[in-house]
Image (cartoon, rainbow, N blue to C red):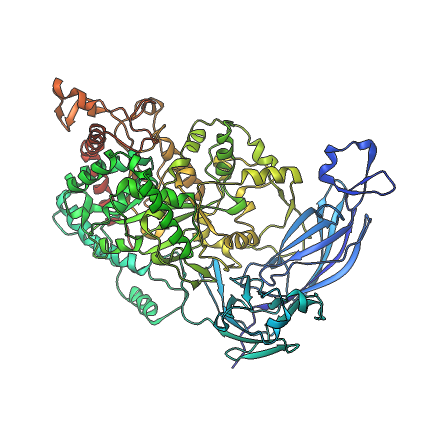
Amino acid sequence: MQRPVSPFNLLTVKILRVRNARKADLRLNVHSAVVLSLDTLSLCSSSRYTVSLSDCYVTLWLPTASTEKVRTRTIRNSKNPVWNEAFCYKIDRRVKNVLELKVCDEDTITRDDELCTVLFDIDKLTVGRTVRVKFQLNPQTREELEVEFTLQNTLDYPDGIITNGVLVAREVSCLEVRVDTGKLNQQSTNQELTFTVKGSHEGSQKISLDSDPSLRIIVFHCVINDQTRLDIILPEELADKNETEKPGVLSFPLNSLPLQKEITVEEDQSFHLCLTARKCSGDLDVRLGFSLCMEEQDFLRKRKKYVAAALKKILHLEEDLKEHEASQYSPCKEDCLSLIHTWLSLLLPCCVEQVPVVAITTTGGGTRSLTAMYGSLLGLQKLNLLDCISYIGGLSGTTWTMANLYEDANWSQKYLEDAIKEARKQVTKSKICCFSLDCLKYYYNDLMERTKEGHNTSFIDLWGLVIESMLHDKKDEHRLSDQRQAVDNGQNPLPIYVAINLKSSYSAQAFRVLFCLAIVNILLPFHDLAAVAIEWLEFTPYEVGLLKYGASIRAEHFGSEFFMGRMVKRLSETRICYMQGMWSSIFSIDVMYVWNLATDSEDFWYRWTRDRVKDIEEEPFLSMNPYEVDTCLLTPSSALSSALRDVLTGRPTIAQYPNFIRGFQMHSKYLESEGFSTWKGTVTQHVFSVTFGGTLDTVIDSFPNKLMETADDELSLVDTGFFINTSYPPLLRSKREVDVILHLNYSGGSQTLPLDQIAKYISGQGIPFPKIEISEEDRENLKECYVFEDADSPQAPTVLFFPLVNDTFKKYKAPGVERSPEDMAEGKVDVSSILSPFTTREVCFSEENFDKLVKLTDYNILNNEKLIIQALRLAVARRKQRNY
């Protein structure tokens, strides 16, 4: 039997030289010279200081092959340092291998200066060839880094991987370390050992020597390769006796450790180590794939029966709508079920799916959106249209409405007046009770209990408890997964809650800068902030998923810890109130006003504090493929601008949760993935111009090392309103095939802004979406409903936009029924002025205002029944014309 071709190669990187190295050391003109950083040059008098040649060295980092950053020796005070030092790696061509080369200047007093960084895609190399590449660091001064690359075949047998074309999961080993301290207890006064496996999920762990023997067992989850080792930091008493390369540190290579076999190691008869490694078997706990999960597909099949029956009645159809149960099941590994489905799809004749998918998208706005959404849903129910809806998307305040409704497994099948009465009671009650001594004690105790369970806690968790007190009279024990009982039979639309993940120190400048500047009342003009470094998360009763990566976990596992797709620490499911705190960071909503009032200008502060990135030319004989990453030169910012950026990246009101894509590597052709490219940051040119030689997607999405690095950070989740006040994105996933979207807008300020922003964002992502055209005259005096469609693109949904306006409601108490003089007062509902009682800051409404807002949004739906029916009829006609 022929041995399969190995995906592994041996890579040798030989650092040859730097030519015309810049001067980077600042020396004081005295006999005992002090070396300073070049960053402080502007603070010094040029007459007393001279700039000397650099003390150069080069660091290498290839995270897909090794957790270690290695470096050359330092060549001091040289313009043309020569090293000729070689470094070897074993690489896997199935993952994206990008080598990071940093040219640094060694300083004796201050921290070393990073002069520049080169990012080089190993896919550009050809197996069996040795090439020399000259990287131009500064064309004006002819500064260049010369490196020699050799790529060779290896016969190593490939390990198993699981991938969706974007993320790659490698085989994970579970390393158990047991310690028999022996004489160590008597020899050491520092009663602990520190164990470290770099690149593991756990990182470092400590064992107390005076603990119970049963507690002297620790476990590491890691990918074992040639560089993996176990490091042990010894107590000080033993460190002096230990003769190792690193004093006080014992190192054990793990690449040759046999599986399922215990290895005993003795150290000076002071203590024994028992090491046991085993492979983590079984399926991944993270679902990889851009298809819908099986539970949602099952929901859709059941929901279509409700939708088909409702449409037949509403549209007065003579025949039943046909249902084509096309499974989207596409697992990462082939199995019997998927093969059978493939054969059947080829043998059976194609048929037409005639049941359209109708969705609701909402915007946030605190208690205003909570209240207004009840009125809109009531109007849809009166028109018998609720059973036509398959999805409801929510964020911020509308998640409060949704969470309350989905406590009832049959809420849409019941008259909503009862639910509205309960909401009225909670909205109109005094909120002072939420800050009583008893409530504060309850908050404290619950947060302490949450901490003991292993969850992170923050201000947002406290805010979630306040929401619970505002909307309930007692502790709410409901959890997101509990809502499955409300959708398992297709009896209600599937709720989708939306949040965004801010990418660590690479995250949205909208949040980092605007929030901090707003605190000190500084208003800077910005472009529309719709191209920030964010990632969309969707939450359903079945799954929590990161759209860009095609990675999802079960809803009850959100908050647990994962590594390389496997759950390594399960925590209890978070109560829904904490999720609402994260979905609706209402106390940060003032920042949005800074955004909404902003005008166009260059973002000086953002550009000044960023690293500068640009593509650089290479040798013409290197290969070029569409999935390769351009070779980039990154020039770090100065120390002063870095310090300012650190201040600006401090972000309050962030909910932090374990990142369930931690440990994954990027697939070698992830940039070609349709699922990834749909949601990656490529729209900077449309909405936010960052002029430092590239775009934001260059900073993050085209840098796989940065994606992997930030995946090791916790998810930093905030209200979607910080980006775009909308819940559109999950509804625009191609697999959901949404035909009609009812956009129920409840935002403050400009009613058209969320729609304009999402249309601009979507057009940049290449997602089918109708063109939004509203005349200036209409923008000044908005109507109750607008219909947008794209007749040339059947994949684009029809959008019905319902702004929060009081138009004909002033004169009509019901569609076609004029108000009497006595009723005119009820038609005076101020939803737009600065004196409106429905501003986002208001958390308590009077009973009269609550009723007015519900009646207004109820009326606006009822008064536009014909437009809704017309859109549904068009959707059915389009479905009948579409072949599968």
Q: Is residue 797 visible?
A: no
Q: Nearer the viewer, residue 135 or 349?
A: 135
Q: Nearer the viewer, residue 652 or 868?
A: 652
Which residue of the protein is positioned furthest toward the right in this rendering?
31
Q: Percent x, y for residue 679? A: 44, 47
Residue drawn at x 51%, y 52% as measured from the top left: 713
User: Is 194 left, or right, of 757 in this rendering?
Assistant: right
Residue drawn at x 26%, y 64% as measured from the top left: 348
User: Is 388 left, or right, of 274 in this rendering?
Assistant: left
Which residue of the protein is positioned furthest toward the top in this rendering?
821
Q: Percent x, y for residue 807? A: 24, 24
> Where is residue 725, by image quadrant?
top left
Task: Pick the quarter of the image with the C terminus.
Answer: bottom left
Q: Percent x, y for residue 770? A: 35, 38
Q: Is residue 570 visible?
A: yes
Q: Percent x, y for residue 489? A: 20, 57
Above or below: residue 610 compared with residue 321: above
Q: Nearer the viewer, residue 204 or 689?
A: 204
